[in-house]
Image: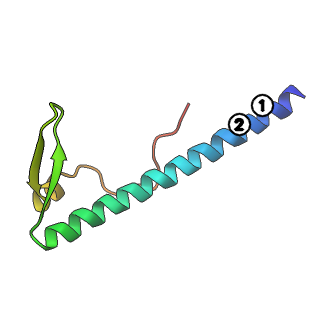
């Protein structure tokens, strides 16, 4: 009985991880599209800084600074 419960919990965790990965990937795609479309119009985006200020940054500059390319895999939960 305990092994069945453990299996169900493992399956539930895998489902949560899979959903989390899909959500993270979708957010990455949306952010990339926003940056590309805004940069194409020579636009800027407003960002919050760690000290609470709001600054306007050209989208082209943000695209240059973007470190990570799209990845279908995100880190897994433990």
- Report the disc number at residue 6: 1
Secondary structure beneath dot 2 equals helix
Residue under the point 77% across and 38% down: 8
- In the image, is residue 32 above or below residue 21? below
Mark 2 highlights which residue?
10
Residue under the point 10% across and 46% down: 55
Residue 71: image location, x then y, percent: 40, 55
In the current view of this chain or complex, which residue is farthest to the right?
1
The quarter of the picture where residue 78 lies is top right
In the current view of this chain or complex, which residue is farthest to the bottom?
41
The quarter of the picture where residue 44 lies is bottom left
- Cα–Cα gap, marks 2 and 1: 6 Å
Crowd class of label 2 (few under 14; some 14 to 19; many from 20; radius 10 Å): few
Crowd class of label 1 (few under 14; some 14 to 19; many from 20; radius 10 Å): few
Residue under the point 85% across and 34% down: 4
Q: Is residue 76 left or right of residue 29?
A: right
Q: Is residue 41 left or right of residue 36?
A: left
Q: Is residue 61 left or right of residue 12?
A: left
In the current view of this chain or complex, which residue is farthest to the top?
2
Residue 1: image location, x then y, percent: 90, 29
Residue under the point 78% across and 36% down: 7
Secondary structure beneath dot 1 equals helix
Q: Is residue 32 left or right of residue 3?
A: left
């Amino acid at each position: 009985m305990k092994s069945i419960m453990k299996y169900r919990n493992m399956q539930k965790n895998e489902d949560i991880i899979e959903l989390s990965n899909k959500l993270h990937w979708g957010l990455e795609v949306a952010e990339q599209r926003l940056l590309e479309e805004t940069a194409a119009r020579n636009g800027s985006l407003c960002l919050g800084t760690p000290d609470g200020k709001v600054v306007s940054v050209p989208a082209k500059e943000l695209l240059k600074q973007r470190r990570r390319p799209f990845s279908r895999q995100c880190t897994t939960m433990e």
